[in-house]
Amino acid sequence: MKRKVFQLLVENNSGVLSRISGLFSRRGYNIESITAGDTADPNITRITIVATGDDEVLAQIEKQVAKLVDVRDIRELKPDVSVYRELALIKVRVEAKDRPELISLTDVFRANVVDVAKDGLIIEITGNQGKINAFLKLIDGYEILEIARTGIAGLRRGTDDIVYPVVN
């Protein structure tokens, strides 16, 4: 199985995310992660989709998504010319005596403690998936109570090949 990251620029209309995810569902394609958010133009939403499949399936995904009415642009964000980031919030049960060690690990990964409770912490970490996975593996000895991950957001490096979509 291969993995591709697609960046879509879509019209900011109700139901567009549902139509895109419905296309994946109807065709049996796998979505590893999907994120959506505003762009500089309030009429346009940027959607980042991470999909897995063989070469034929991934090519078909790109073609099918491009045909959707609200989709203005679709591009692959190749790892060597793009920047990917993900945010994770991790709730960990930790006694007061063990907090300094966990906070020290958090600092090494440039993560932040965003909430402290009597018996636990919530840690915020941002980075590529490898960094987040490495941090999770490192704190595996602690009791991880909950994890919320945003999925990948990405942009192509540099200022060439920028898409300025025209909305009809």
Image (cartoon, grey):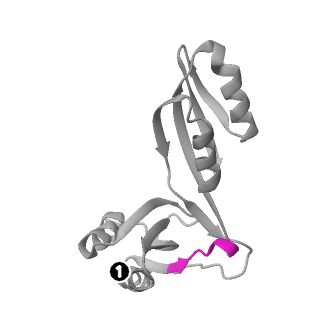
Q: Which residue is mark 1?
A: 68
Dividing the picture into quadrants, the one containing residue 128 is bottom right
- Indicate the secondary structure of the residue bearing disc 1: loop
Q: In the rendered view, would you say 131 is above or below 120? A: below
- The residue sitting at 28% across, 72% down in the picture is 28
Q: Is residue 12 left or right of residue 113?
A: left
- The residue sitting at 63% across, 68% down in the picture is 155
Q: Which residues are magenta?
A: 74-81
Q: Position of residue 101 (x, y in %)?
A: 70, 24
- Quadrant in the picture for the C terminus: bottom left
Residue 112 counted in the magenta span: no
Disc 1 packing (10 Å; few <14; some 14–19; many ≥20): some
- The residue sitting at 54% across, 13% down in the picture is 118
Dividing the picture into quadrants, the one containing residue 40 is bottom right
- The residue sitting at 56% across, 21% down in the picture is 94
Which amino acid does the dot numbered 1 rest on? Answer: Leu
Q: Is residue 43 visible?
A: no
Between 155 and 134, the one lying in front of the other is: 134
